[in-house]
Amino acid sequence: MKLSYTIYLLLLSTVICLGQNLSVTGMVRDRETRQPIVYSTISIKPAQTGTATNSKGAFTLAIPQNTVNPALVISSIGYQTDTVAIVAGKTNYEISLNPDKKSLNEVVVTGVSRATLARENPIPIIAISTKKWSRLQKVMLLMCW
């Protein structure tokens, strides 16, 4: 009887251990200045999961247990994308990204105000209630006579 309980507990603990995810934490920094890179994107290469770094450049990511040869793909605007292989038993990663020397194209933002819209539309458009419309009709009839 004791042997069957022991085997049952071993099987249960094996099933529980297999269902767990591996948690990976780390920090993303600029390779030249060693400053943290905020809100960069970290994803797992074969899986469809990912996360972003916080305001201090730190991240935590759960990797599904059944992922084969997982790798972290790290990207951020202004930096070259990097791929880091996940090593079994290692849970903390210090990642450095190289700055991308390419400059971004110029961006022009244009706003349109109500005054601009009024100038573009030469005929003023207003809403008139039926009561005002009937008064206006009476005034127009009196002016015509």
Image (cartoon, rainbow, N blue to C red):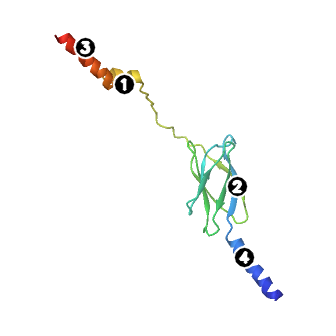
Where disc 2 sits, the SS reads: strand
Q: What is the C-alpha distance between the residues marked 4 and 3? A: 91 Å
Taking the spot 77% from the left edge, 79% from the top edge, the residue there is 9
Answer above or below: position of 93 versus 66. Answer: above
Taking the spot 80% from the left edge, 83% from the top edge, the residue there is 6
Residue 4 shows which numbered tag? none
Of labels 4 and 2, earlier in sequence is: 4
Tell me if mark 4 has few (under 14), some (14-19) or many (20+) residues whose alpha carbon lies within 10 angstroms of its own. Answer: few
Q: Which residue is mark 2?
A: 25
Residue 138 horizontal side relative to residue 28, left or right: left
Tell me if mark 3 has few (under 14), some (14-19) or many (20+) residues whose alpha carbon lies within 10 angstroms of its own. Answer: few
Front residue (pair 98, 23): 23
Specify the amino acid type for callout 3.
Val
Q: What is the C-alpha distance between the residues marked 4 and 2? A: 25 Å
Residue 41 horizontal side relative to residue 135, left or right: right
Answer above or below: position of 53 versus 87. Answer: above
Specify the amino acid type for callout 4.
Thr
Front residue (pair 39, 138): 138
Does any portion of residue 125 appear in the rendered image?
no
Q: Which image quarter: residue 65?
A: bottom right
Residue 117 shows which numbered tag? 1
Q: Which image quarter: residue 71?
A: bottom right
Q: Are marks 1 and 3 in contact (CB under 8 Å)?
A: no
Give how far across and how far down residue 129 sits, in percent. 33, 25
Answer above or below: position of 47 versus 141. Answer: below
Give how far across and how far down residue 55 sits, in percent. 67, 42
Specify the amino acid type for callout 2.
Thr
Q: Which residue is mark 3?
A: 139
Does any portion of residue 107 appear in the rendered image?
yes
Discs 4/1, front: 1
Q: What is the C-alpha distance between the residues marked 4 and 1? A: 68 Å
